[in-house]
């Protein structure tokens, strides 16, 4: 079970604030939140997080001002938009943690929401890596491999020169030239994207 420093009282205050300031897309969502407020044992197992889709038992509740889906409930690998079925699951499994994501305009800037938000322990390790960061990591890996192969070929070229082995010198010099040309061509292709 996830330990939390967010008190039941803080969660109640937040839910009341949320319901007073936002109109939800599904009326059943209001019922669920009101039900949670009135049952401390359930509220103790409620965790407000981001990205509920990764949780074993998660729920997304959206407001009218959000472009997100109105309601979605995740349990293990089953997904439903039926809020009533979700409500029954909450009532029947009151001792299981439930992870709730609230989708509303400017939620990332809401101090009230931030005050009750917890880290989502189910996010994949690479969730917060951007496409640009992935591209930079790939470029760095390619550069590292290029430099290692270039050094090996340069050592072989030097060895061939030291031993006056013209045939090997030409072979490794051509491979080194091709390696440099291929690497430069790959970099031009990446820069054009």
Image (spheres, helix red, strand yellow):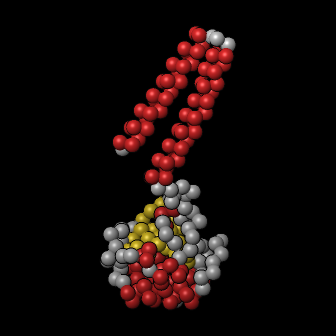
| 68 sits left or right of 12 in the view | left
| 104 sits left or right of 134 in the view | left
Residue 10 lies, in percent from the top left, at: 55, 87
Looking at the picture, tell me which residue is in the foreground, 129 or 75: 129
> Residue at (58%, 10%) from the top-left corner?
167
In this rendering, is residue 183 above or below 170?
below
> Residue at (36%, 68%) from the top-left corner?
69
> Residue at (57%, 89%) from the top-left corner?
9
Can residue 92 be spotted in the picture? Answer: no
Quarter of the figure with the N terminus: bottom right
In this rendering, is residue 82 above or below 140?
below
Can residue 172 be spotted in the picture? Answer: yes
Number of numbered labels in the structure image = 0
In this rendering, is residue 69 above or below 6?
above
Residue 144 lies, in percent from the top left, at: 58, 39
Quarter of the figure with the C terminus: top left
Looking at the picture, tell me which residue is in the foreground, 142 or 77: 142
Residue 105 image-quadrant placement: bottom left
In this rendering, is residue 4 above or below 146?
below
| 176 sits left or right of 106 in the view | right
> Residue at (42%, 65%) from the top-left corner?
80
Residue 30 lies, in percent from the top left, at: 40, 83
Residue 68 lies, in percent from the top left, at: 36, 68
């Amino acid at each position: 079970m996830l330990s939390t420093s967010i008190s039941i009282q803080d969660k109640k205050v937040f839910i009341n604030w949320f319901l007073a300031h936002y109109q939800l897309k599904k009326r059943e969502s209001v019922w669920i939140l009101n039900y949670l407020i009135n049952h401390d044992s359930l509220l103790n197992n409620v965790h407000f997080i981001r990205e509920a889709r990764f949780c074993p038992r998660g729920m997304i509740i959206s407001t009218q001002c959000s472009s997100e889906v109105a309601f979605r409930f995740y349990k293990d690998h089953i997904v439903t938009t039926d809020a009533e079925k979700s409500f029954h699951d909450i009532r029947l499994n009151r001792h299981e943690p439930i992870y709730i994501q609230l989708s509303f305009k400017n939620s990332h800037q809401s101090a009230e929401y931030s005050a009750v938000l917890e880290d989502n322990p189910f996010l994949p390790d690479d969730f917060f890596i951007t496409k640009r960061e992935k591209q930079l990591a790939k470029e760095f890996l390619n550069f590292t491999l290029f430099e290692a192969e270039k050094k090996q070929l340069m050592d072989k070229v030097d060895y061939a020169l030291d031993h006056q082995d013209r045939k090997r010198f030409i072979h490794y010099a051509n491979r080194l030239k091709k390696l440099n040309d291929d690497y430069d061509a790959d970099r031009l292709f990446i820069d054009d994207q």
